[in-house]
Image: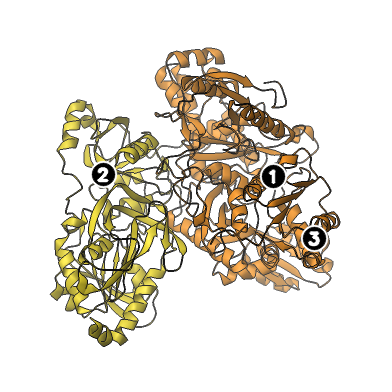
Chain colours: A yellow, B orange
Amino acid sequence: MTVSNTPASTAAVLMLEDGRTFRGRSYGAEGTALGEAVFATGMTGYQETITDPSYARQLVVQTAPHIGNTGVNTDDAESRRIWVAGYIVRDAARRPSNWRSERTLDEELAAQGVVGISGVDTRAVTRHLRERGAMKAGIFSGADAARPDSELLADVLAQEPMAGARLAEEVSVEASYLVEPKDHGWDGEPRFTVAALDLGIKSMTPVRFAERGVRVHVLPASATLADVTALSPDGVFMSNGPGDPATADVQVELLRDVLDTGIPFFGICFGNQILGRALGFGTYKLRYGHRGINQPVLDRRTGKVEITSQNHGFAVDAPLDGPVTAPEARFGRVEVSHVSLNDDVVEGLACLDIPAFSVQYHPEAAAGPHDSAYLFDRFVDLMGSSKTDASKIKESL
Amino acid sequence: MPRRTDLTSVLVIGSGPIVIGQAAEFDYSGTQALRVLKEEGLRVILVNSNPATIMTDPEFADATYVEPITPEVVEKIIAKERPDAILPTMGGQTALNTAIALDKNGVLEKYNVELIGANIAAIELGEDREKFKGVVERCGAESAKSIIVHSMDEAFAAAEELGYPMVVRPSFTMGGLGSGLAYNEADLRRIAGAGIQYSPTSEVLLEESILGWKEYELEMMRDRNDNVVVVCSIENFDPVGVHTGDSITVAPAMTLTDREYQKLRNIAIAVIREVGVDTGGCNIQFAIEPGTGRVVVIEMNPRVSRSSALASKATGFAIAKIATKLALGYSLDEIPNDITKQTPASFEPTLDYVVVKVPRFAFEKFPAADPTLTTTMKSVGEAMAIGRNFTEALQKALRSLEQKGASLSFAPVDPAGVPGLVEAAKRPTTDRLKQVQQALLGGATVEELYEATGIDPWYLDQLALINEVAAEIAAAGAVNEEILRRAKRHGFSDEQIGALTNTPEAVVRGVRHALNVRPVFKTVDTCAAEFAAYTPYHYSSYDEEDEVAQHDKPSIIILGSGPNRIGQGIEFDYSCVHATMALREAGHETVMINCNPETVSTDYDISDRLYFEPLTLEDVLEVIAAEQRTGECWACSSSSAGRPR
């Protein structure tokens, strides 16, 4: 008989802020996890999901019922640790099977102290969140699960809300590091240098640059304009990351300074929201967000549809019928370049008078489809043409 | 891009009589196509020689020809009807071959008829083995390695590179004469030696064997704007060597990381573009070497297939219907997703359940036939089941087969018999699932069975889990709430629980109902609940939250006819569909229960509600209970289903 790799599980409970509870079994570490409950609909890529820093302080519900089937390996982690605050699954794998598997997901969660719950009706949780919006929640297992529900609910309600949360600095690296093209299959000399602000960056993002011959300096979220320009970069990049973009005043100011210098800019996810704010648009919280790897986005310039990887709870509030002059008029005209076909949310911004663009989704994929990888090429092209036209662009400003 | 305005009439070619490998699924796809064409206001002409189909009902086409599907006959129909276009991708290989013949003999050109949803050059690229290898290579992917040799010296040199076993195929011989599998040098000497003799060009193709590799399939859609989406991934329970139609298959794939899955997706998209599939559906099959992850492309089908029917039912994404719209010129983002209404069809369905398909065989009718499963399809029908996990879906699928002994049983296995079971399981037959499960029950390890069968250890462990739960049920002695919930979560029927506890099935059910251990019904919605679903396509699961909406009108349940078998084909699906149509016309609300994914009756818009469930007493009683919980349920009719129930 096969011996189950799963350590003995104990009772666990998921408590939502409106008092709805789901009972299950402990998964990973035992104890208490508090955060915002959100659901993710990808059928593959749970390891990438849990290690995505954008999920910091969130309790992630996986809608795919079998989780952990392919175990955990060293290569697929998207950052240095697991970031989800808690993990909610239906059927946790007893035995992983994959030639790259190194250990079970259960062991990995436990080793990193991540409290999870298995055996719950994840579809019911998802429907609840869809109808009522992402909300505060807690997972309680082991001795904590035995506390009275009223105490658990009080703990859930006592946590800070996601709206207004400033988290990028919490997940960012402390010291900068370099990602070299030669380590990622690029044979020649680096073509360009990019300064990438880590607001919760996934490891695949600098890799996608490096594969194209771009040397990437990954900088902490606290980097200043002086830190950036000291690298004489051909381009500046701002990554995805957790929290409310309305709190990212420091990065918004930095980006405005960068845009004023005429250095090309590319942003992903949180970086898109920061570009939106730098241009003078607002951001708002979506009811339950977009978290999945099957999300259709229309590239409004080509009319083509991309199936994208998404993970965002906030979005940019910009007019869909563009182009318009940015509220910060010195940056000229801007248009919404990409839009979600599911709900018309802004999924990309393109500046027409300065070399800057961004998308709300994840062209680096991991997890997810590779349909949007062309955006990295577009940024490389932009850096190439800006290098030759730098003076022209400065004049036009 | 809206639909083309230059088309006013379209000829649809059906698939003719049911044969093994080409069954009811093409009535399903053809019927969907006809409905779309009619809705779009086109004049529709149909040719199909099988009168036991829904599609040949007069109301589905403007002109219906129940005639042989041959180029000669179809030419006459073209001459008389003068359609603007032919849609040849809904009638399986029969329809596609006929269309190719009509192109080759100049009929299409003569009558100025266009093929839509297909492109001859693409079909030929997809179907010609050697040309397709070139396609795969240009896409940066691999086919199975092969080397052409003309002498035994060359053959032995090639063997160094390919390794044993290898496939030996003499060139230009009829019907595979002289082909074989060489496991060692002696085999190679014998088979290739003879093959060089047989071949008129003294030429033999040696190909690496991919037997035992993991097998996957992706169902894809492409529109005329070159948007490509994956509708569904399907994983074979059996490794390469068993025809997909004869293997248990699972959707979505259970044992791929995202990196591996995206690799398959990238290759599939590149191949579709390189082949030049016009618009519509196609599927691509892959093999993955389990120890290294090396991917080999096996083949593609540039048309709607049996797998498309399965993928449609498994995801709620109506492939044939959407493929027809794409053939008319719509793009995916212009077509609404029927189930969510607000979101478009240009997305990839995501599942929050597991689908298992099991084949139904008829070897009992042919005692002399060899039940070994090979790359030639031998099953005559199939059943599909949906559950919230693999064990639930598998056990539901097995009881959906309606074959005595199809469900797993758990009587103690004598350890002395285990080596025999493991040995027997090495050869894929209709009994392999049971042999594996029984061997595990008798004490064999997952590792031993993986070694013997190549079935992924994850699946083997799931079978071990079923055995463990069975042991817990037996150990519990009496039926209590806790053990019932545990058993039901892994798909055990009342009958199985009864056998394990020496309790009559009816008593198990009585106790279970008294303890209120009842299934809930979830919804197939294409999107894992991200958006609200407006189509009541349900499946049962022992989970927490029920989704069946209240209904005002009393409902009438129609029992479907289950998997196809010899003596019961598509004709009873025909009667079920007519029963629901007639009742709806008379103002009643109808409910369909069926488990055959190849059918029209399991389309989610044929009845007011569809329950994709096994047709056993237990499962049907639970649907009746759900209908009664949510309104009135007047009747349950089994008269259309072909035999007493």
Q: Are marks 3 and 2 in contact (CB under 8 Å)?
A: no
Q: Position of residue B426 (x, y in %)?
A: 63, 44
Label 1: chain letter: B
Instruction: Name which of mark 3 and mark 1 comes first in the sequence.
Output: 3
- Give the number of the mark in front: 3 or 2: 2
Residue indicated by mark 2: A114
Residue pictured at 56% horizontal, 55% vertical: B220
- Give the number of the mark in front: 1 or 2: 2
Q: At label 1, which amino acid type do we have?
A: Leu
Residue pictured at 47% horizontal, 64% vertical: A304
Q: Residues within 10 Å of mark 2 (few under 14, many from 20)?
A: many
Residue indicated by mark 3: B178
| Residue under disc 3 on the same chain as residue under disc 2 | no
Q: Position of residue B7 (x, y in %)?
A: 67, 59
Describe the element under mark 2 as helix, strand or loop.
Answer: loop
| Residue under disc 1 on the same chain as residue under disc 2 | no
Q: CA distance from mark 3 to mark 1?
A: 21 Å
Label 3: chain letter: B
Image quadrant occupied by the C terminus of chain A: bottom left
Describe the element under mark 1 as helix, strand or loop.
Answer: loop
Please identify the quarter of the rendering in which residue A298 is found.
Answer: bottom left
Q: Position of residue B488 (x, y in %)?
A: 47, 26
Residue pictured at 34% horizontal, 52% vertical: A49
Q: At label 3, which amino acid type do we have?
A: Gly
Q: Are marks 3 and 1 in contact (CB under 8 Å)?
A: no
Q: Is residue A180 above or below residue B293?
A: below
Q: Are marks 1 and 2 in contact (CB under 8 Å)?
A: no
> Disc number at residue B373?
1
Question: Is residue B160 in view from this perspective?
Answer: no
